[in-house]
Amino acid sequence: MSLLMQSAIFLGAAVVAVPISRRLGLGSVLGYLAAGAAIGPWGFGLISDVENILHFAEFGVVLLLFVIGLELQPSRLWTMRRPVFGLGGLQVTVTAIVIAGAAWSFGLEWRVALVAGLALSLSSTAFALQLLAEKGQLTMRHGRTAFSILLFQDIAVIPVLALVPLMSMNDTGAVDPMGALIAVGQVAAIIAAVIVVGRFALRHVFRLVARSGINEVFTACALLTVIGTALIMEGAGLSMALGAFLAGVLLADSEFRHALEADIEPFKGLLLGLFFIAVGMSVNFGLLVTELWLVLALVLGLTALKFAVLYGLGVMSGHSARSGVYLAISLSQGGEFAFVILTIAVAAAVIPGSLSELLILVVTFSMALTPVLYLLWEAILAARKADATDRPYEMPVDEENKVIIAGFGRYGQIVGRVLQARKIAFTALEADSQQVDFVAKYGNKVYYGDAGRIELLRAAGADKAAIFVLAVDDADTSVRIARTVTENFPDLRIFARARNRQHAYRLMDVGVTRIWRETFHSSLETAHHALISLGFSESEAEHTVQTFRDHDEARLVEQHGVQDPATVAAQSREWARELEEILAQDKKDEGAG
């Protein structure tokens, strides 16, 4: 069968199965698995070369790990350290130990039991987050806790993927201590080399590519980065996903993070869907005939165990009983990374293929059980009075930036500096890579990318932001971005800059009502209204803007005649700190009074 014909079959199966699965409330992951089962050897038999397809489709998981790495900013992890490393670490550790202990007590060799415990301790990130999002519960307390636990699980996958190949037995059936020690040393050296080279080379490469202004080349560079690091790790006998994850982490704090995420997302979605289809094709449904009761017992046992652990952790961390049940149900299933870990374990001869087939079937059916449990729990709640103590979780202000600034030229920088003076975090997007490099010299953090791209806006958190400052210089680009935002994020308030009256009219035509025309004083006015919208009083906002105006005008005179760029940059950073201190002292004086 030709590659084109196979592609048509894959796409057709996904187009049919995934919408039906989501309509039934079962999520897209189960839809992909069902599509694979239908076209695979146990279904209509349209595709038979399952092993090669599964090997190719694993690149979808590689891209997923790259995106996860991009999102793991150290500052964000530090803010969420307690729920991530506390609850997440406890959940994985306790669940893995209990499952491994139970498997070992039933006669499985310790390596096999440990791999099974680690694989089954993980939940489905794609499945759980989608389910919570569809229910509108991601911002509730159990939703935020579930996200934190899943984040730890995603991080924990990396050492597990590195550990599994090292557990491979030698010809005598025992682990060679010296060989294992040498292997660990080689792994550490390779990882260190990738980190050092990537840290100092990747950003410079992306800056050069971005200056070309060709989006296709930038996308190609992003894919080359993922593929290159993945191949390096695979050549060293490690997981390709580990290399992609490292590449993502190395770029997590770069100005290209959002642009990379937007470019990789379509490829990740398609290939991850193909991976799930391939897993569905490889599921051995014959076990339902020969081992039906064992499969059912393992599915129920896995779900009950994870439910008990998660409910206990939820109540221990202060969740109400209702919230604890929601948390436990949402993460009670096996996860997609179990498929990856089991596949690698079979390839490394750590576990037998027959056991892997059984566990894959168990994970698949545990996923199918989760939405059923959700529906049952909601039916029970419908018969009860809602628990008034379970209010929506209030998102910490330092976790999600409430302001997005599109265009970080002279106008956007003034708005950003006023917000910065009040220590209000914002996300700045700039399509000119040279401008990104320039403002970075002055201590500003700006992300490279076209704010008119819907993928980039989603990656920057436009669906969670409160204010969108449209400070783009070019009128045509400004109107295009405004149209994209108003059509896709109607609740996001736009504060727009207009170069002239005609530009303002065009912005009004696409629904923008808050418009300020050029430049310094109008940008201060924009910042003034932004502060009020963020909860500052009229007097506080006016005082902040007036203090900034006086401070900036004085500095303008003082800096006149200074030619050295390094001196200008140093003075700007010092004056920014000075302004923060002035406003902080003013607030203390007000409090004392």
Image (cartoon, grey):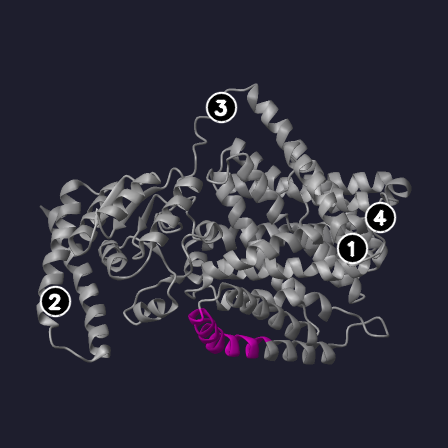
Q: Earlier in the sequence, mark 4 or mark 3?
A: 4
Q: Earlier in the sequence, mark 4 or mark 2?
A: 4
State the SS at label 2.
helix
Q: Earlier in the sequence, mark 1 or mark 3?
A: 1
State the SS at label 1.
helix
State the SS at label 3.
loop
* Disc marking residue 556: 2
Q: Earlier in the sequence, mark 1 or mark 4?
A: 4
Count of labels in the image = 4
Q: Which residue is mark 1?
A: 104
Above-or-below relation of 183 to 379: below
Q: Nearer the observer, disc 1 or disc 4?
A: 4
Q: Nearer the observer, disc 4 or disc 3?
A: 4
As measured in the structure, the alpha-carbon distance from the residue carrying label 4 to the one carrying label 3 is 49 Å
Span highlighted in magenta in the image: 191-212
Q: Is residue 533 visible?
A: yes
Q: Amino acid at mark 1?
A: Trp
**Residue 145 image offset from top left, x and y in percent:** 50, 44
**Residue 266 image offset from top left, x and y in percent:** 58, 54
Q: Which residue is mark 3?
A: 386
**Residue 65 image offset from top left, x and y in percent:** 59, 60
As measured in the structure, the alpha-carbon distance from the residue carrying label 1 to the one carrying label 2 is 73 Å
**Residue 213 image offset from top left, x and y in percent:** 44, 67
* Disc marking residue 46: 4
* Crowd tier of the residue under label 4, counting other residues whose Cα lies within 10 Å: few below 14, some 14–19, many 20 or above: some
Which residue is depicted at the point 71% across and 65% down? 164
The foreground one among 391 and 455 is 455
Above-or-below relation of 115 to 37: below
Q: Is residue 554 magenta?
A: no
As measured in the structure, the alpha-carbon distance from the residue carrying label 1 to the one carrying label 4 is 39 Å
